[in-house]
Image (tube, rainbow, N blue to C red):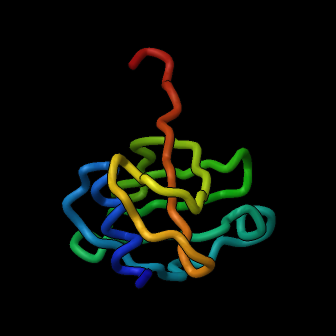
Amino acid sequence: MKPAKAILVFILCFSMATTYCIVSASEPIGEEKKAIIDRWVSESNPDWELTFVSDGKKCLQTLQGSLIRTSLFEKSNTSPQCSEVVPVDESTSYLKLTNVAVPGD
């Protein structure tokens, strides 16, 4: 499966009308750098980022540098994904985000 198709599945899962690219933006320092697994930045809105950190398998969504949502993430390689039948082989990997409840929301 091509990376663009995997991203499409991600977009379908979370009803987001944008595409992503992996970037290495503004390198963090020290322990923070070690904790970051990956960072995705929206191609249509570079102020929107998903930062994946190893601390509890968290995904931090930020908009203009402000935290807007925290999710837990896990990778899987099974079908279906988000009620869609998807190909599964050694070259595929799918992302699942689960929102973390925020007190007061």
Residue 30: x %, y % from top left: 79, 69
- Nearer to us in this view, 95 or 29: 95
- Nearer to us in this view, 33 or 96: 96
Residue ID at (37%, 48%): 82
Q: Quadrant of residue 8?
A: bottom left
- Nearer to us in this view, 67 or 13: 13
Task: Indicate left or right for 36 with 47 as reference.
Answer: right
Residue 26: x %, y % from top left: 54, 78
Using the image, determine if residue 103 lies above or below residue 58: above
- Nearer to us in this view, 56 or 15: 15
Residue ID at (49%, 47%): 97
Residue 6: x %, y % from top left: 41, 71
Image quarter in which the C terminus is found = top left
Residue ID at (35%, 73%): 20
Using the image, determine if residue 20 lies above or below residue 35: below
Task: Indicate left or right for 46 with 56 as reference.
Answer: left
Image quarter in which the N terminus is found = bottom left
Using the image, determine if residue 10 lies above or below residue 66: below
Residue ID at (59%, 58%): 76
Residue 79: x %, y % from top left: 48, 56
